[in-house]
Amino acid sequence: MEKNWLKTAIAVTMSGEGHEEGLKRSFANMPETVTDDQIKGLGSVLEAVSNDKFDFATVTTTEKIVNN
């Protein structure tokens, strides 16, 4: 089997006043490999430009798997 990376996306969930249960912000066109430090950094930047708290992130990677 051959795996070919197609795309990676990150959905960041943040909570704050008016959306205590969480608000999702999605980012496409991410690099193939995303590190924990990069995700934490993204959360910190989003916290800095909003009044919200970074709760968690969901990373989705799409690959094409070819049966040789």
Image (spheres, helix red, strand yellow):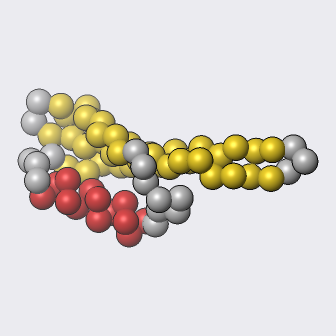
Choose between 30 and 34: the one closer to the eye: 30
Residue 52 lies, in percent from the top left, at: 15, 46
Residue 24 lies, in percent from the top left, at: 30, 36
Please report the residue visible at 43 percent of the width from the left and 54 percent of the height from the top. Answer: 30
* Position of residue 56 in the picture relative to residue 43 (left or right): right
Please report the residue visible at 34 percent of the width from the left and 40 percent of the height from the top. Answer: 26
Q: So how many labels did they put on this image?
A: 0
Residue 38 lies in quadrant: bottom left
Q: As drawn, which residue projects farthest toward the bottom? A: 37
Please report the residue visible at 53 percent of the width from the left and 47 percent of the height from the top. Answer: 7
Please report the residue visible at 69 percent of the width from the left and 52 percent of the height from the top. Answer: 4
* Position of residue 3 in the picture relative to residue 6 (left or right): right
Residue 55 lies, in percent from the top left, at: 30, 48
* Position of residue 14 in the picture relative to residue 8 (left or right): left
Choose between 66 and 41: the one closer to the eye: 66
